[in-house]
Amino acid sequence: MANDWRIRINKLKLVTALVHGACLRSGREAPDMNLEGELVDDLRAEVMDELLRGWNDFDQW
């Protein structure tokens, strides 16, 4: 069970790091905590949509 907790924390840090880096690479300032949370939620939703779309495309075969 302890391993599951660490995995969840690491995934959160990865997504947050991706959002933070994307803002900096696009020339914007680093997001504050509130904006970062919104961007992380948006990224997660987009990733899930893409995974489901890919799953549905694969399922048709």
Image: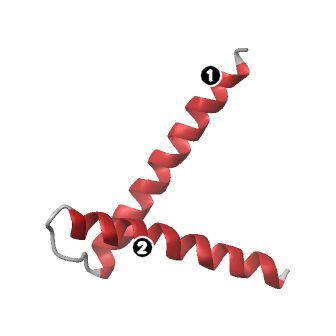
Which is more N-terminal, label 1 or label 2? 2
Mark sitting on residue 17: 2
Q: Nearer the viewer, residue 61 or 1?
A: 61
- Residue found at x 56% / y 30%: 53
Q: Look at the numbered disc 2 and give the secondary structure of its residue.
A: helix
Give the x, y percent position of residue 48: 55, 45
Residue 41, given in percent of the width and then of the height, sits at 43, 60
* CA–CA distance in space, label 2 to label 1: 30 Å
Q: Which mark is residue 19?
A: none
Helix, strand or loop at mark 1? helix
Answer with left or right where residue 56 lies relative to residue 14.
right
Q: Report the residue that reaches farthest toward the front.
A: 25
Residue type, label 1: Asp
Dot 1 corresponds to which residue? 57
Where residue 40 appears, as percent x and y from the top left, is 41, 64
In the image, is residue 41 above or below residue 14? above
Residue at x 49% of width, y 55% of height = 44
Direction from residue 49 to residue 5 in the image, left or right: right
